[in-house]
Amino acid sequence: MKVTIDKNAGFCWGVVRTIAVAEESLKERPKVYCLGDIIHNTEEVARLKKLGLDTVTVNDFPNLKKGSTILIRAHGEPPETYKKALEYGLELIDATCPIVTRVQERVRKFVTQGYQIVIFGKKTHAEVVGINGVTGGTAIVVLNKEEALAAVDFKQPTVLFAQTTMDKQEFKDLAAALKEKLDTLIIGSMEETAVEYQAKDTICGQVSGRESKLRQFAAENDIIIFTAGRKSSNGKVLYNICKEVNERTYFAETKEEIDWSWFEGAETIGITGATSTPQWAMRQIKTLIDLKFGITDDQPEAESLTEAEEPEEIAAEIAAEAAQKREKEKVL
C-alpha cells in the first residue's frame, strides 16, 4: 500500500499571510482577538487559541478593553467594522487577503460609477459581507443563475463579481445567462469606461488553478481522503471535484473521523485538502494510516506554501502596511 499527500494541497498564500501575521502578533502581546475563525479549520483554530488568539465578533467590541488588538482575517470586513473599532479604541491588524482587497476596490469603483452590483456567493459568508459592505448593502447576492435572473434589473448597467472560493464553472454559467438578457453588452477590462456589463471572474486562482491537478491526483489513487473544515467553502468545491473523478473519495475533518472500512482493497491512497487545510493535518492522517497498515514512509516532506514562504517577511510587510494606514487615519 502507498500513501501520498497531494503536493498541491494546503494553505493558499492568503491564508499563509494571515497565519503568519497572527503568530507574529502573538509574539508581541499575550492576547489577540480575531474577527471570526481565522480560517475554516477547527484544528488550526484550536492550535492558535493555545497561543492566545481568541475568536470574537463585532458585537463583542463594547466588552473589550480599550487598546485591545483585533485581527481582521483573510476574508476581509465591511467598512463599518473599521469605524466601530476606532470608535471603541481598538487596535486593528488588517490581514485581509490581497485578492479580496482587490475585489473590494473593484466593487467600490463601479458603485461610484452607478453600476448595479451582483455578487455570486453566500450572503452570510464573511468575504461577501465585506464586499457587500463596500456597496452600502445594495448588492444583489445570488447563489445561482435562477436567483440572478429573478433579481437583476436588466435596464441598469451591471457588474457581476464572485466570492473568490465559488465554483468557476457555475460562475461562467451565471455570467452567460445574464448576458443573454442584456440589450447592450460590452465585455472589457476593468479599466474600460462606458461599459454596460462586465462579468469579473474573481474566483481565486488558488482554487480554480488546482482543479486540473486535483482531478489528476484523484484519478491516480484508489481512494482519496479529503480533509478540511466543514465550514470551508473552497473545501466543498474541491471535495466535489475529487468525488466527480473518484467515487471513493471520503471526507474527514480530523484524523479521528477516519473509517478503516474505506481502505478495503485499496493499494494507493491519496490525501488532499482545502486551501485552509494545514500541511501538518494531512501529515497526521498519513502517519495514522502508515501505522495502521505497517507502511514504511519513503515519501519526502511535501513543500507547502507555509514552508515555502517566509512568515517573518510576510508579517513585516503587513505590519508596515498597518502602520501606514494608521498614519493616514491620524491625518484624516
Image (cartoon, rainbow, N blue to C red):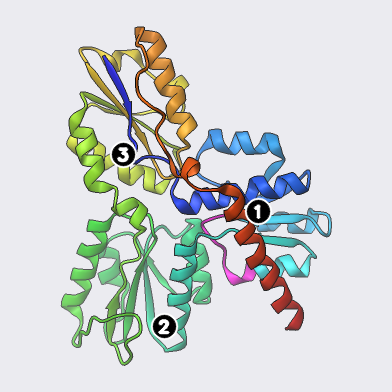
Q: Where is residue 12 in the image (x, y as percent from the top left)?
A: 43, 49
Residue 283 placement (x, y as % from top left): 44, 26
Quick one: SS at disc 1?
Answer: loop
Give the alpha-carbon distance from disc 3 to disc 1, as whole Å. Answer: 29 Å
Whole-percent x, y for residue 281 in the image: 47, 30
Q: Is mark 3 on a helix, strand or loop?
A: helix
Number of numbered tags placed on the structure image: 3
The residue labelled by disc 3 is 239
- From which residue to which does the magenta span run? 73-81
Q: Do the residues labelled 3 and 2 touch (CB within 8 Å)?
A: no
Question: Is the magenta region chiefly helix, strand or loop?
Answer: loop
Q: How crowded is mark 2: few (under 14 residues within 10 Å), some or many (20 or more)?
A: some
Q: Which residue is disc 2 drawn over?
A: 110
Name the amino acid type tagged 1.
Answer: Thr
Sooner in the amino-acid sequence: mark 1 or mark 2: 1
Is residue 66 in sight in this rendering? yes
